Image (cartoon, helix red, strand yellow):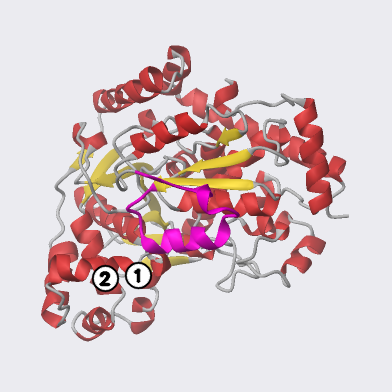
């Protein structure tokens, strides 16, 4: 299982020693997963030092901000992770729909830096990654590779971003500022739907032994860190909302598939509250819904395959959302004309409208899927649906420029705003929704065979064992094991002293 990141012992003692020495010289201390799940357990001295560290800098202490509990300035902690609750006047449903805001994470203002850290730590503390000569390869459709590059800068090694050439301009602008060499940005053909092309490029890069591929789609560290850390954060958000409300229940957790790391938080919520898990994908590329294919622009959610770390047999519903809706709603939520319409014509609180830029394209996708789920299950005011906004609007300003001629004839006025609201929100239905039976789950699970066994070389036993919930629950045993190794690694390096 070495290729899947489940080691609990040092694999290469020489690599471990060199890496440990490098971290000591660079004064890099690794936070434990438990500390990122509950940052109040981070020692007071470290938290004190953080107040003087720019959250957007490649400073080693920013590793201790790779969690959901940063305040709006990203310099201090809050008691409850940041979230936006959407009113019925916007969603059209009685259920309470809440999005945790990922733009409070450091360096990349997106929660995918947590996934990058979760994939990195097992390789570091088991002596499989040597920052003195290895290049860290981060395959992604946008945010994960930025998180990987940010962490690579902290470690003083070369981080390589592999992502489709048609992703947003802002993503590439950010990467241009952060990579150490322009060649460390590898553009693959296509757009959000072209994950296979990313895999092919990584397969070529993997032939060089100095390249270490951190494939978020199959690294169990991604699953473990989200089930542990994101799950705990969303549980706190729900408990805050439910306080004093006797009939409240956490009815559903919604997440676009992407690498399926964020979906893992649903396993924590289901185990704790009996919450149903909703996986989301683009209508234009309905892989899980219909074994379909296509192109779309909901950047960050991936498709055309079933991620290896997707616990398919624990998923309750699949929902399709159109990129027409996310593209046009992004314009509505992030332009003066759109905000004017929402306040003056829909009667929304200006304070709520001011929070809508916390929702990037995938956040809007999750919001719309939550509305569909609420309508399908006839959820009421006692029902809470939690989901995430991976990033905010900062990564997509150029998408407004593209959307104007495509959807609005270069004129977005009050009429266009009303049409957008009516089509994308008020008129939303329960089309492209499947409540999964056991047979449906098996169909989706089996679809993954062609990617992972036939194309990526996973053994049949490694593939089939994932059909059992006991396998996924057993992964939680990795948290104390890895945390013990992290503490030992830090003690040996002497960093932070």
Secondary-structure class at tag 2: helix
Q: Tell whether label 1 touches label 2 (CB within 8 Å).
A: yes
Give coordinates of residue 339: x percent, y percent: 27, 80
Other residues around mark 2 within 10 Å, as few (<14) / some (14–19) / many (≥20):
few
- Residue position marked by numbered label 2 in the rendering: 401
Question: Which quadrant of the rendered structure holds the N terminus?
Answer: top right
Compared across the picture, whether 232 is left or right of 395 comes to right
Other residues around mark 1 within 10 Å, as few (<14) / some (14–19) / many (≥20):
some
Please tell me which residue lies in front, 103 or 476. Answer: 103
Q: Distance between the Cα atoms at labels 2 and 1?
A: 7 Å
Which range of residues does the magenta coloring cover?
Answer: 164-188
**Residue under the image location 31 percent in, 21 percent down:** 446
Compared across the picture, whether 272 is left or right of 255 comes to right
Residue 391 seen in this snapshot? no
Picture quadrant of residue 485: top right
Give coordinates of residue 250: x percent, y percent: 40, 51
- On screen, 66 above or below 189? below
Picture quadrant of residue 427: bottom left
- Residue position marked by numbered label 1 in the rendering: 397
Q: Is residue 109 magenta?
A: no
Secondary-structure class at tag 1: helix
**Residue under the image location 51 percent in, 49 percent down:** 183
- On screen, 63 above or below 196? below
Residue 155 seen in this snapshot? yes
Give coordinates of residue 434: x percent, y percent: 21, 38
Compared across the picture, whether 442 is left or right of 187 comes to left
Q: Is residue 183 magenta?
A: yes
Question: Which quadrant of the rendered structure holds the C terminus?
Answer: bottom right
How many marks are shown on the rendered structure? 2
Residue 210: image tag: none
Give coordinates of residue 59: x percent, y percent: 70, 61
């Amino acid at each position: 299982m070495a290729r899947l990141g489940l080691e609990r012992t040092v694999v290469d003692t020489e690599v471990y020693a060199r890496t440990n020495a490098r971290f000591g010289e660079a004064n890099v201390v690794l936070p434990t997963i438990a500390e990122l799940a509950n940052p109040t357990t981070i020692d007071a001295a470290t938290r004190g030092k953080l107040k003087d560290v720019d959250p957007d800098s490649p400073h080693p202490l920013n590793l201790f901000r790779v969690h959901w509990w940063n305040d709006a300035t990203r310099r201090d902690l809050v008691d409850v992770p940041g979230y936006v609750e959407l009113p019925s006047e916007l969603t059209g449903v009685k259920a309470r729909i809440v999005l945790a805001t990922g733009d409070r994470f450091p360096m990349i203002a997106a929660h995918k830096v947590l996934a990058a850290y979760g994939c990195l730590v097992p390789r570091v503390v088991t002596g499989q990654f040597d920052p003195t000569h290895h290049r860290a390869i981060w395959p992604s459709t946008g945010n994960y590779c930025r998180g990987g590059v940010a962490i690579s800068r902290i470690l003083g090694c070369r981080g390589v971003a592999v992502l489709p050439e048609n992703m947003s301009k802002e993503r590439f602008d950010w990467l241009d500022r952060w990579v150490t060499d322009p060649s460390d940005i590898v553009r693959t053909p296509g757009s959000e739907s072209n994950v296979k092309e990313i895999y092919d490029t990584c397969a070529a890069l993997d032939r060089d032994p100095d390249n270490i591929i951190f494939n978020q789609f199959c690294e169990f560290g991604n699953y473990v860190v989200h089930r542990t850390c994101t799950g705990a954060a969303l549980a706190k958000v729900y408990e805050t909302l439910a306080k004093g409300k006797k009939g409240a229940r956490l009815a559903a957790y919604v997440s676009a598939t992407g690498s399926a790391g964020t979906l893992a938080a649903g396993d924590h919520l289901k185990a704790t509250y009996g919450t149903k898990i909703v996986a989301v994908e683009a209508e234009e590329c309905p892989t899980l819904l219909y074994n379909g294919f296509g192109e779309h622009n909901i950047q960050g959610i991936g498709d055309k395959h079933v991620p290896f770390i997707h616990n398919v047999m624990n998923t309750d519903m699949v929902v399709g959302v159109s990129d027409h809706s996310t593209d046009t709603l992004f314009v509505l939520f992030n332009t003066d004309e759109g905000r004017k319409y929402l306040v003056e014509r829909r009667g929304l609180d200006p304070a709520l409208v001011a929070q809508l830029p916390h929702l990037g394209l995938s956040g809007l996708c999750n919001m719309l899927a939550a509305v569909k789920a609420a309508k399908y299950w006839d959820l009421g005011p006692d029902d809470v649906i939690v989901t995430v906004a991976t990033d905010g609007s900062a990564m997509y300003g150029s998408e407004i420029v593209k959307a104007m001629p495509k959807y609005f004839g270069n004129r977005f006025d009050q009429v266009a705003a009303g049409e957008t609201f009516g089509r994308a929100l008020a008129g939303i239905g329960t089309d492209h929704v499947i409540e999964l039976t056991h047979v449906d789950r098996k169909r989706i699970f089996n679809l993954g065979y062609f990617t992972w066994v036939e194309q990526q070389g996973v053994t049949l036993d490694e593939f089939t064992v994932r059909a059992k919930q006991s396998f996924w629950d057993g992964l939680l045993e990795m948290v104390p094991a890895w945390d013990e190794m992290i503490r030992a690694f830090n003690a040996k390096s002497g960093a932070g002293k």
